[in-house]
Image (cartoon, rainbow, N blue to C red):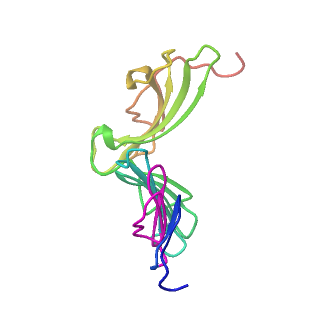
Amino acid sequence: EEGISQTLTTNNIIATGNIGIGTITPAQKLTINGNGALLAGNELRFYNAANNNWGQIESPASGALQFSSGGGVVMYINSSNNVGIGTTSPIDKLNVDGGTGDAAAQDAKIALTRISSTGNVLAGKMVLTTKPSDPTNHGNLVFQVKTTASSGESTGYYTDAMTIDGNSANVGIGTSSPTVNLAVNKSVMVGAG
């Protein structure tokens, strides 16, 4: 009923229509104080126990869904069902964006991993990185494999197995600078082995 405020031992209903759990002053339609959530408009926010870190799910546009953390948007699904990781403008079914800039920190990476029975992490990566001779216009696509047996992670544990040049589309195996359609800088076996 309008204008009635009711206080219960664990839940609170305020005359404004807001519901509070763990609080007597809910500021939103549903406010959960502590290890919980805050519902505000088109978003659902989850807080940690200390209420100083959060994650959020929201619908910022018609048909879109966005996942955020305290540092910003981490995943975005647009109305065409394209998924963006690191971008809110995905250009295809899955778009991983490393960010803006020309340094290794902005490389876009996809990792495939599994744990061996001995605890080592077996891994391979696909990395979109800058073309060293033309870092602002073309990106090389590099396929890496983890060649150091380890349960840890370090860029030094990986070997570039194959590089596709972002300007010429030349393919390099054992070389990161292929100058012909297929450049192989390793031993080659043709036929059955």
Query: Residue at the location (48% across, 76% down)?
Result: 5
Query: Is the residue 119 above or below the residue 171 in the image?
Result: above
Magenta stretch: residue 31 in it? yes
Side (left or right) of 130 relative to 184: left
Query: Residue at the location (33% across, 44% down)?
Result: 106
Farthest residue, direction right = 192
Query: Is the residue 76 above or below the residue 125 in the image?
Result: below
Q: Which quadrant, please, contains the C terminus?
A: top right
Magenta span: helix, strand or loop, mainly?
Answer: loop
Query: Camera-side residue: 161 or 44?
Result: 44
Q: Which residues are magenta?
A: 17-42
Query: Residue at the location (36% across, 51% down)?
Result: 70
Q: Position of residue 126 (x, y in %)?
A: 49, 38
Q: Position of residue 109 (x, y in %)?
A: 45, 41
Query: Camera-side residue: 8 or 149?
Result: 8
Query: Is the residue 141 above or below the residue 60 in the image?
Result: above
Q: Which quadrant, please, contains the N terminus?
A: bottom right
Question: Exactly how many numbered labels are in the figure?
Answer: 0
Query: Residue at the location (54% across, 27% down)?
Result: 123
Query: Camera-side residue: 49 or 127?
Result: 49
Q: Position of residue 57 (x, y in %)?
A: 49, 60
Side (left or right) of 173 relative to 134: right
Q: Position of residue 65 (x, y in %)?
A: 52, 64
Query: Camera-side residue: 36 or 71?
Result: 36
Query: Is the residue 1 above or below the residue 121 in the image?
Result: below
Magenta stretch: residue 113 in it? no
Side (left or right) of 135 relative to 152: left
Farthest residue, direction bottom = 2
